[in-house]
Image: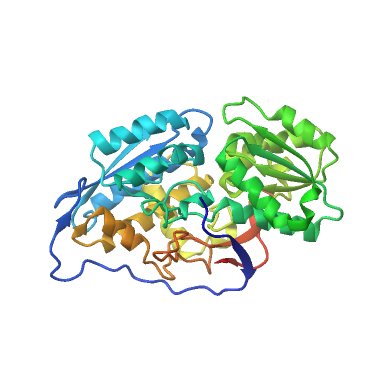
Amino acid sequence: MKTSRRVFVGGGSAAALLAGAGAPAGAQKKYDEGASDTEIRIGNTNPYSGPASAYAAIGKTIDTYFKSVNEAGGINGRKVKFLSLDDGYSPPKTVEMVRQLVEQDKIFALFQSLGTPCNTAIHKYMNTKKVPQIYVATGASKWGDPQHFPWTMGFQPDYHTEAAIYGKHALANVKDAKIGVLSQNDDYGRDYLGGLKDGLGKDVGRIVKSVTFEATDPTVDSQIIQLKDSGANVFMNFAGPKAAAQGIRKAADLGWKPAHYLNNVSVSVAAVMKPAGYENAQGIITASYLMDATDKQWEANDEMKAWSAWMDKWMPGANKADANHVYAYAVSFLMTETLKRCGDELTRANLMKQAAGFQKFRVPLLLPGITINTSPTDFYPIQAVQLQRFKGETWELFGEVMHAESS
C-alpha cells in the first residue's frame, strides 16, 4: 500500500558533508538477537544466478565493503557478519532463504535484499517478525509505508516517481508523442507503468502499446517488434539489465529510432550499454542519483577518487564501469553509518529509529545536491534525481537536480 505520491520540482543546492554520530556517552548496552559485544549479523538475498544475475555485483561489493569495515576495526568495535544467499530472483526461494536467515541464522536485520517481487514475498513476514528489512534493493513505492510496514525501508528513488518524470519529459520534448511501453510482468513493472500513467495525466491516451515480459523469458524480441509496429515514437524501456540491453539492441536491429527512456536500475555501462552496443544506445535518457565512474567529470572528485582507490585495493579484478559497484558502495556506507548511530543500543527498534533520523546527510557518490533525508513518517531516503543522456561511451548529465516532495 502506498501512502504518498510525490512530484519533482527543480532547484536545490549541494549540501555540506555531515559527520557521523557516534554512541551516546555512558549509554547502557542493549542487544536484540543477532547483535552482541563482538558481532552484528546482517542477512541478505541476491540473485547470484538466474535472470537478474547482473546484480550479483551488488552482493559481492557489499560483502567486500563490510570486510574492509571489519579490517578497520568494525562498527563501534563490533565485526559485521554478512550472510548473503543466492535466491536466483525467485520469490519462493527468497521466502525459504529469509526464513532460514531469521529463524536459524538469527540475523539482526535483513539489508539490501534485491528485487521487487522477492521483497514483496517477504514483506509481511518481516514486519510480523519485527525484523528490519532495511534499505531494500528495489525502488518500488511500497517500501515507504511506515504506517503499515514500520520494519521496511527503501533506499533509491521510487520507480513510480521516476516513471512520472519520463512521461512529463516525453510530453514536453517529443512532438506528437506516441508511447510504447516494455515492462516486466510483476510489481516492479506495474509500479513503473502506474507512474508513467500518472505522469502523463490527461495525456495517458498517448500510450499506444504496452507489452510485458516475464523475468525468465529468454528474449524480448517479439515485444520490441510489437512496439515498433504500433507506430510508437517513444520507447519506455522498463526492464532489468538483461532485457533492457536486448531491447536496445533489437530496436536498433529493426531500424526503430524512438525517443528512448531507460529505467535507472539498468544504467550500468558495463552490464547494459556495452552489451547492447554503444552505437545502439546513443541518446537514451534516464534519471540518476549516483555518479557514474565512466563520466570523466568526476575524475578529480574526492569521493570518486576514494571509491576508485578502495576498488583497486579490495576488488582489483572488478569492472569499474559497472554502476552496481558504485550503488553497493553508497548503500553500504549508509548502512554502516546507521549501525554506528545505534551506539551500544543494538536493538532492531533503534536501528529503524536511526534509519528514520537522517537530515541532509551526505553519502559518498550521490550526485551533488542529493542527500539522505528521512523521518518517522518518511521512509524514502533519496528523493532527488537528475536526468542524463547516453553519449559516446558514457552518461552525460543535463538539467538541474529535481527534488521529490510528498503531496
Identify the residue at horizontal 53%, vertical 69% (top origin): 369
> Quick check: can you spot residue 320?
no
Q: Does residue 311 sit above or below 274 in this rendering?
A: below
Which residue is at 83% across, 51% downward?
177
Which quadrant of the structure image shows residue 306?
bottom left
Residue 49 visible: yes
Q: Where is residue 235 in the image (x, y as percent from the top left)?
A: 75, 44
Color encoding of the figure: rainbow
Give how far across and how far down residue 108 sits, in percent: 26, 47
- Location of residue 360 with respect to 337 vertically, above or below: below
128 in relation to 297, above or below: above
**258 horizontally vs 138: left or right:** right
Residue drawn at (57%, 37%) of the image: 186
Q: Which residue is drawn at 54% across and 46% down?
A: 321
- Image side of residue 348 versus residue 259, left or right: left
Question: Closer to the camera, 258 or 255?
Answer: 258
Q: In which image quadrant can residue 104 be found?
A: top left
Q: Nearer the viewer, residue 25 or 151?
A: 151
Label tally: 0
Q: Residue 359: horizontal and vertical position, in percent?
A: 41, 70
Quadrant including the C terminus: bottom right
Is 149 on the left-hand or right-hand side of 270?
A: left
Q: Is residue 113 left or right of residue 232?
A: left
Q: Residue 118 location in percent, x, y?
A: 46, 37
Q: Is residue 368 above or below residue 387?
A: below
Work out which residue is located at the far top of the displayed protein and give it: 218
Task: In this rendered view, identify the residue nearer to me: 116 or 335.
Answer: 116
